């Protein structure tokens, strides 16, 4: 699943990004985190309001920018270059938002795959159902109840 997160960030490979680690509350070495994890799941709303991206073939530095790059190690010249041109090239912009529930199941959990899937569906229905205001998942009271309920089942639950 880390590869899916990386693709969204235009990163290659399977080594988890900071976003992935944060969403599933991973804090250790990625190999150990992966070995201790039985299942990862998420559900939510992803809304893109606007997206703009340049194709890779269009990304060419202008000659005057290329000539400004210091040819030898000169910290002062490098600092001037960075101050003038920056350190990154923006190749795309995506505006929108998301409201997502993340679940990480440990190997010690005895829940079956379908039980985890049902739990995620029930939590998503409770959170994303616009007509029901009795479940305010953003409140600490509800969040605490859900977290306690799930931790009794040996699953970690995260909402962002």
Image: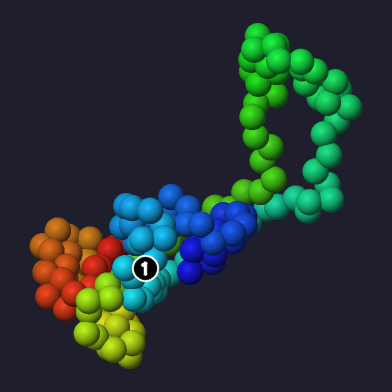
In the rendering, at what x and y percent does residue 53 appear?
A: 70, 52
Q: Say if 9 sits above or below 129 in the image.
A: above
Left or right: where does residue 96 sit relative to residue 26? right
Q: Say if 83 sits above or below 45 in the image.
A: above
Q: In which quarter of the image is residue 147?
A: bottom left
Left or right: where does residue 74 sit relative to residue 47? right
Q: Quadrant of residue 116?
A: bottom left
Q: Say if 3 sits above or below 63 in the image.
A: below
Residue depicted at 27% across the width and 72% down the height = 106
Tally of numbered tags: 1
Residue depicted at 83% across the width and 39% down the height = 60
In the rendering, at what x and y percent does residue 149 appear?
A: 13, 75
Residue depicted at 47% across the width and 57% down the height = 16
In the rendering, at what x and y percent does residue 92 appear?
A: 66, 48
Is 94 in front, or is 24? 24
Question: For the view shown, which residue lies furthest in the top direction?
Answer: 76
Is 141 in front, or is 78? 78
Q: How crowded is mark 1: few (under 14 residues within 10 Å), some or many (20 or more)?
A: few
- On the question of residue 94 being in view, the answer is yes
Left or right: where does residue 148 sit relative to residue 123? left
Circle 1 residue: 35
């Amino acid at each position: 699943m880390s590869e899916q997160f990386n693709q969204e960030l235009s990163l290659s490979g399977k080594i988890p990004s900071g976003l992935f680690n944060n969403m599933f509350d991973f804090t250790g070495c990625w190999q150990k985190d992966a070995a201790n994890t039985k299942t990862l799941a998420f559900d939510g709303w992803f809304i893109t309001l606007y997206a703009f991206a340049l194709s890779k073939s269009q990304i060419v530095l202008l000659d005057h920018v290329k000539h400004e790059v210091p040819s030898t190690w000169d910290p002062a010249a490098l600092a001037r270059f960075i101050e003038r041109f920056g350190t990154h090239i923006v190749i795309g912009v995506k505006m929108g938002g998301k409201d997502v529930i993340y679940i990480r199941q440990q190997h010690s959990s005895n829940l079956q795959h379908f039980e985890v899937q049902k739990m995620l569906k029930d939590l998503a229905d409770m959170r994303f159902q616009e007509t029901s205001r009795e479940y305010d998942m953003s409140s600490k009271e509800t969040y605490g109840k859900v977290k306690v309920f799930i931790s009794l089942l040996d699953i970690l639950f995260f909402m962002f």
